[in-house]
Image (spheres, rainbow, N blue to C red):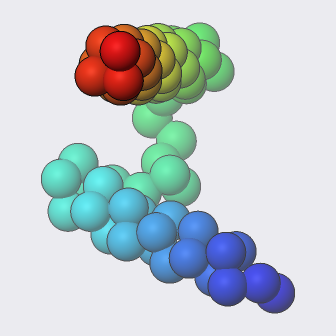
Amino acid sequence: MSSIEEKVIAEIRWRAKKGEAKYGTTMDRDDLSVAEWVQHLKEELMDAVIYAQKIIDALDTQSNTLYIEEE
């Protein structure tokens, strides 16, 4: 296994512990319907799109700043 995979596994373990401490349950829970799991996934994906847009905006700002400074 690569060091990259090891880092991802370590982060998954850390997040699982953090989530269990915060929510008092694990992903082994069975109190949510499939529709509720899909809703959770949808919300996480929407957050991911917002993070991606934030990064795009930051890169655009950085690129424009670099371009202006070079003139």
Which residue in the rendered view is the most extreme toward the front? 71
Numbered disc total: 0
Image position of 64 with respect to 19: above or below: above
> 37 or 6, which is in the foreground?
6
Task: Name the image quarter holding the N terminus.
Answer: bottom right
Image position of 21 with respect to 66: above or below: below
x, y (%) of residue 31?
45, 35
Task: Name the image quarter holding the C terminus.
Answer: top left
Residue 9 at least partly seen: no
Image position of 15 with respect to 48: above or below: below
| 4 to the left or right of 37 | right
Residue 4 at least partly seen: yes
| 60 to the left or right of 12 | left
x, y (%) of residue 52?
48, 21
> 19 or 9, which is in the foreground?
9
Which residue in the rendered view is the most extreme toward the right? 1
> 53 or 16, which is in the foreground?
53
x, y (%) of residue 62?
34, 24
x, y (%) of residue 38?
59, 17
User: Which residue is at 23% across, 48% downward?
Assistant: 23
User: Which residue is at 26% across, 62% downward?
Assistant: 18
| 31 to the left or right of 64 | right
User: Which residue is at 36% across, 23% downward?
Assistant: 70
Residue 33 image-quadrant placement: top right
